[in-house]
Amino acid sequence: MSDILLAPEKKDAAIADLARLLEGALANRGGLTGMALKTGLAMLKSGRPDVLERGAARMLPEFAAQLQPLFERFQKEGGSDFTGFLKKNSGETATVLARTIDQLMSTSQNATAKSLYAKFRGGADKDIAAMVPEVGRLVQKYLA
C-alpha cells in the first residue's frame, strides 16, 4: 500500500486529500473545543497557509506504514471493499490513526501546532473513529 500511496504520480494528490480530510475533521468539531481548534487552525494558516499540506506530507508515509498490516489482512481475507473492512475494524483502525498522529506530533517543531493538537487530543478518540470511513475512502481511491 505504501508503494501505491507514495508513488510519484499519486503522492501529491494523496497528500492534498489527506490535508482536506484533516481540515474537515477539525471543522466538524463542535463546542468550545471546536471553536478553539478552528481559531488555532486559522492562526496556523495565517502564518503558514500550507500547514495542513505540510503536516499531511509528513503524516502520509507513517500513516501508510501503520495501515499496511490492516491492508495485508484485508487482502488475505479476499476483501474488495477496504472502506468497509476499516469500518468493520474501526476500533483497531482508530488506534492506528491516533498512534500515527501522536507520534508525528511528539516530534513536531511547531509549538502552536503541538498546542492545538494537545487541545484536540483530549477528546479526539471519538473524532478519530469518525474519520475511519473517510480514511478508507481516501486509501481505496488510490488503490483502484
Image (cartoon, grey):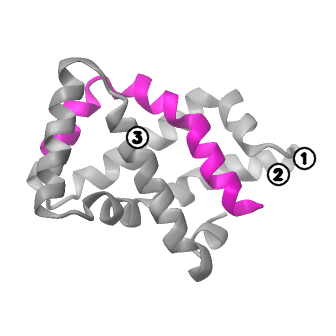
Question: Which numbered disc, 2 or 3, marks the residue that appears first in the sequence?
Answer: 3
Residue 74 drawn at (x, y percent): 78, 45
Nearest the viewer among 24 and 120 is 24
Q: Is residue 132 above or below residue 108?
A: above
Picture quadrant of residue 128 = top left
Query: Label 1 vs label 2: CA separation?
Result: 5 Å
Left or right of 61 on screen, residue 2: right
Residue on which the image places disc 3: 24
Badge 1 marks a residue whose secondary structure is loop
Question: Does the segment drawn in magenta span residue 139?
Answer: yes
For the residues labelled 1 and 2, say whether their Cβ atoms are less than 8 Å apart.
yes
Where residue 82 sits, quadrant-wise, is: top right
Q: Read off the residue under disc 1.
A: 78
Q: Which residue range is magenta in the image?
A: 115-144
Q: Residue at x 30, y 21 (%)?
A: 30
Q: Which residue position holds label 2?
A: 75
**Residue 123 horizontal/vertical position (percent):** 30, 23
Toward the bottom, the furthest residue is 8
Amino acid type, label 1? Gly
- Residue 61 in sight: no
Residue 53 painted magenta: no
